[in-house]
Amino acid sequence: MNWLDNVIGWFSPESAYRRQAFRNALEITRKYDAGTYTKTNQNWRVFNEAAEAEDSWNRDIVRARARDLEKNSDVMNSIIGAYKRNVFGAGYHLRASTENTELNSQIQKLWEKWQKKRNCDVTGTQTLSQMLRMMVERKKVDGGAILLKRYTSEGFLPFQLQALEVDELDAVSTGTHAEGNKVVGGIEYNSYNKPIGYYFRRYSTDGYTTEDSEYIPADSVIFMYSKRRPSQVREMSDIAPTITRVRDINEFIQSVSVKERILACFSVFVKRALPPSTGRAMLANGGDGERYQGKMLTPGMIQYLNPGDEVQTVTPNGQATDATQFVKQQMRMAGSGQGLSYEVTSRDMAESNYSSARQGIIEDEMTYQEDIEMLIDVLDEIYSTFLISCVLSGKVDIPDFWENKDTYLSHRWVKAPKKWIDPAKEANANKVALSTGEKTFADIAAERGKDWKEEIDELAEIKAYAESKGVVIGGIQNETERQ
């Protein structure tokens, strides 16, 4: 109410009430229901802030809770496992695409050698595939993962990777540099909010004590995280929208488990009409008789009660079958919050058929695609530094590399395929797609994780060898052979 309403209310409360009632009605007609503070929205108070202003207050707590569920929740691990299996899966194979076939083969062999843990990891403990799987997992739980490019003499190339956690970003380092660059959350940004460098806290081997921060230029840092708002500058756990749901499932399952264990116990309580002589003397001397504090209901337990004491039980309503439906619904909601189907998170296929499973896989693949694209960007940057290191160290001889850098860096990644749900149906579908031109042989080979040229060469080699032995095998035939 404004000052005029207060004055009117002093002389005529009824008139002031009517004025306010009509004003409220007029405001409701002018606004969205979602923007009013009436009815069910009256306690829903929210504010608009920049992404970093919101995230910085909750980032560490959300990450700690996500990690706790990662360690203690099977539901959380089912979600994480689904992403790790499908985003990285069995890995990605390099296909160098320079115009020189022999050079392509040489680069691919060097890449296979460099991927070994003694060559690509500064700690010598993980292969490149293991490091990337870990990045997918950390990105899902922590919100981000970091790789540093390190130039050492440990491997056969002067280039290795160091994996760091987002915790190691020195969030204490903030302020403005003399050149005008801002430091927020341990990251230095220019006036366009482009990362210029990163400050990392250096921990001792025990992981507790810290040394001075280390500054790493941005071109030596690979920071993998999902940016959901233009003003976002650091990571937030991908599991954040689902954390409370997963925790509710865990607490509910634990409660049901305790209830079912209690119901399964067979125990005997003996109620005495009169206490024994020793008990009567103990009570007469101010004793407490049988003490129940700290007692637990255990199978086969026999417990004596004090005279006059009775056993009262509390039996919660609901059965295990109700719990099953509740958990299923919660699992569906937890999965959908991460863009996943119920089947892929629960591994429960009892209610699925081929069509529903196929549709679920298609939708899930679209969810994984965002992280797959991000992971391929990481692989691209690693590969570029790898090939440059090969050239500088003399592992490959490319005289005009710097003049035609983009040409020699040309490559693609072939993802290892997944197993088919119904091989016969998939094979027939590919046959139709190939005959109608909806797919090419290169498309089908890529879906199987193979290079189409290599596959044709293999088919030709096998076919020629079989013919030399007088054996007829299946394969692609020319028009003359079909007739």
Image: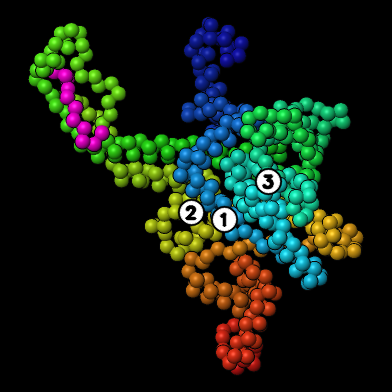
Q: Residue 395 location, x and y as percent?
A: 81, 61
Q: Earlier in the sequence, mark 1 or mark 2?
A: 1
Callout 1 environment at 10 Å: few (<14), some (14 to 19), or many (20+)?
A: some
The first of marks 2 and 3 along the sequence is: 3
What kind of residue is marked 2? Val
User: Residue 77: horizontal and vertical position, in percent?
Assistant: 50, 46
Q: Which residue is mark 3?
A: 123
Task: Residue 273: give x, y in percent of width and height.
Answer: 9, 20
Magenta segment: does it hold 300? yes
Of the residues shown, which amino acid type is indicated by label 1? Asn
State whether residue 244 is above or below residue 365. Answer: above
Q: How far apart are labels 2 and 3 at the CA level?
A: 34 Å
Q: Tag 1's secondary structure? A: helix
248 or 278, nearer to the observer: 278
Q: Quadrant of the C terminus?
A: bottom right
**147 with respect to 2 (left or right):** right
- Name the mark on residue 86: 1
Tell me which residue sits at (31%, 45%) in the image. Answer: 321
Label annotation for residue 344? 2
The residue positioned 74% from the left and 62% from the top of the image is 110
Viewer-closest of 252 and 171: 171
Main structural element of the magenta stretch: helix, strand or loop? loop
Q: Give the structural element (helix, strand or loop) at label 2.
A: helix
The reply to whether the C-beta atoms of the residues labelled 1 and 2 are less than 8 Å apart is yes
Q: Could you tell me the amino acid type at mark 3?
A: Thr
- The magenta stretch spans which residues? 298-309
Residue 171 visible? The answer is no
